Image (cartoon, rainbow, N blue to C red):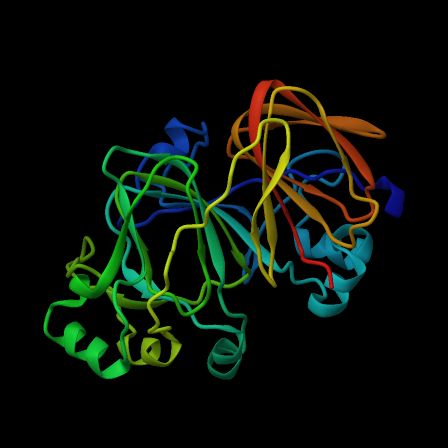
Amino acid sequence: METNDLYPLKFTPIFKEKIWGGDKIRSVFGMDYAPLPNCGEAWVLSGYGDEISVVSNGFLAENQLDELIDVYMGDLVGEAVFEQYGNNFPLLIKILNANDWLSIQVHPDDELAQSRHNGLGKTEMWYVAEAEPGAELISGFNREMDAEQYLYDLNNGTLKDILNYEKVKKGDVFFMPAGRVHALGPGLLIFEIQQSSDLTYRIYDFDRVDDKGNARQLHTDLALDALDFKQHASYRTEYTPEFNRTVPIVESKYFNTSLIHFDKPVVKDYSGLDSFVILQCAEGECFVEYESGSETLRAGEVLLVPAIMERIQITPKPEAKILEIYYPQD
């Protein structure tokens, strides 16, 4: 296979039933997760563990993402990314639909995850695709905390009193660095962009049991060393939407994400970028045209643009919102 054969790749979603899952991944995005009774998570681009995304378009269809990185290396993901991660794709892209509260949880950072689990930490961001009236989430503490006070509240049933609750609307963005306590509430449909990790320490799960009467495992001792006890001035990521402009919304050491809301063609020049680019359609539909062809991108879908591809044109049908994600440059 020649490197100049590379083209933007689409993938078959990997669906996950969850105790808190709903049905909006099907009703809003048209994704069929049968025979699952609900779908809490759709992993739309993954190189994590055994859950490796499989290409669904073009002559590379049915190949796994890690296999293609083995073949195309830096031409697919970028030279710096390949040098650092090999055939392990560094990001995991999910759609989450919460029909109930997720567990109150925290993720370890790279250092803690490496020492305990020989893996990556989990820094992530949320873009709210839909929010029912009154929907809310938890992000961080609502006061300065320390381990002693936190354990007191945890053990005395007052944990929820010290957490920061945020009312949520469509288009809101929340950046969740590793160490920040958080939880999604019911009525939310979320795009989640994160490090390629699924390490989660559950702190509290609302005393729920599964269909066999078993409570889910908690990780209160592990979480203690992972938590950031600081109170931050703001937990919501502020940005100003601009029509037909690329608007940066999150810049971090693991991913940069921009929002493009447009009703006319946009030409993107990636010639100076040593990274893959992920396009995730948040709303509407668009055509992505490149030198030798085109792909249709519908709401919920992702397209992986190879690092070697320098120029594309994105045309909305007739209007669309997309998230543009790439690995940060030094």
Looking at the rendered image, the quarter that the C terminus falls into is bottom right
Q: Quadrant of residue 230?
A: bottom left
Indicate whether 72 appears above or below 294. below
Identify which residue, 137 or 62, lies in the foreground: 137
In the image, what residue occupies the spot 33% across and 64% down? Answer: 181
Percent from the top left, x then y, of residue 203? 26, 68
Residue most extreme to the top: 318
Percent from the top left, x then y, of residue 236? 40, 51
Identify which residue, 38 or 280, lies in the foreground: 280
Left/right placement of residue 110 relative to residue 204 reads right
Asked whether the viewer can see residue 46, the reply is no
Percent from the top left, x then y, of residue 297? 61, 29
- Label tally: 0
In the image, what residue occupies the spot 46% across and 63% down? Answer: 177
Asked whether the viewer can see residue 181, the reply is yes
Residue most extreme to the left: 156
Percent from the top left, x then y, of residue 282? 51, 33
